[in-house]
Amino acid sequence: MPRIFARGETMKPHDSATQRIENDNARFAIKGVLALEAGRGSLPSVVIRNEHASATVYLHGAHVTHFQPKGKGPVLWMSDWSWFEAGKPIRGGVPICWPWFGPHAGDPKLPGHGFARLVEWKLTKTAQLPGGRTQVQLALTPAEVRTSPAAGLLKVFPHPFELTFAVTVGAELEMELAVHNPGQAPFTFEEALHTYLVTGDIWDARIRGLAGAKYVDKMQAMKVCTQEAEEVVFAGETDRVYLDTRSACELIDSKLERRIAVAKENSVNTVVWNPHKAKAKAMPDFGDGEWKGMVCIETANVGPGAVTLPPGGTHAMKAVLALT
């Protein structure tokens, strides 16, 4: 029976959120495996616990905040200082950067990394797959953006679009971002799965798989350099966009004695980022010392690698994380 409110009483945001979670559970829950729950900040989240792993996906930003294979440690890093609020990005996990990456080229005052991570997506499908894997699908169109605090950003990107984000949880974490152009004119976008990975200590971490690649070094005034060494190591703030990189990377973590493979499809850029001490301290949603325990290996199409999508076209970019 629906709740009857007394005169002068109105439904509080918490009541509304709770009702939506109950409604979505009725449609999408998978008994013993998947349920919607109120997450941090009372934001709705999809929580998965299957025979292979546990994972959490927030509807806000279609944001994966947790992935942990059974019997192993967490793969994704999250800041203890992150916001969990409407209109603000979540710090850590896998933010979706779309339709631009970093500062907007025409107006750096606009929110960095676009609006996809600032908006609550629509949950459209859940499924239990062969082999015990579990899949969640979320969607974003201009309709969802218009009812969010980011509505004004549609003036900056005035194109019809349909985004679908599929997250498949098994022994590996698969994430596929599909962009469809239902309009009559082409549009160009940048995209990234801005993946934050846990490290035992950044000084003991290194990345293999980028040897010989050219990269734009944001710490050297956008200078184009070549990755001469076999492995990327960290000696300070690091912010690099590797060019024409289609193969997998591997994070080798000596302290945690493990490796994380990051494979990808339909991505021509790999972004490597660690803010180091000064930048971390300057960010209000990032703990002063947290930079030591994380590194980003991002699956991306940015800058010269941006995608131009014709009318009726679809582009799908995939990232797969595997802990070994």
Image (spheres, helix red, strand yellow):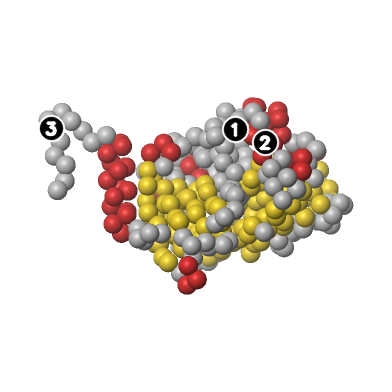
Q: Residue at x 40, y 57 (%)?
A: 34
Amino acid type of the residue tagged 2 in the rendering: Trp
User: What residue is rendered at 21% in x and 33% in y?
Assistant: 10
Mark 2, residue position: 291
Residue 282 on image: x %, y %:
64, 27
Callout 3–callout 2 Cβ contact below 8 Å: no
10 Å crowding of disc 1: few (<14), some (14-19), many (20+)? many
Q: Amino acid at mark 3?
A: Ala
SS at badge 3: loop
Q: Nearer the viewer, residue 321 or 131?
A: 131
The earlier-in-sequence mark between 1 and 3 is: 3
Query: Which residue is the extreme one toward the front?
Result: 71
Q: Which residue is mark 3?
A: 6
| Res 219 quadrant in image | top right
Q: Amino acid at mark 1?
A: Phe
State how far apart marks 1 and 3 are (Cα).
Answer: 43 Å
In the picture as drawn, the residue positioned furthest to the bottom comes out as 130
Mark 1 highlights which residue? 286
Label 1: state its secondary structure: loop
The tag on residue 57 is none
What's the residue at 48%, 62% (across, down)?
51
- 116 with respect to 16 (left or right): right
Q: Earlier in the sequence, mark 1 or mark 2?
A: 1
Residue contact at pointers 1 and 2, CB within 8 angstroms: yes
Q: Position of residue 195 (x, y in %)?
A: 61, 49
Q: Mark 1 to mark 2: distance in Å?
A: 8 Å
Residue occupying the point 82% across, 56% down: 211
Q: Residues within 10 Å of mark 3 (few under 14, many from 20)?
A: few
Which marked residue is nearer to the observer: mark 3 or mark 2? 2
Q: As displayed, is residue 85 above or below residue 22?
A: above
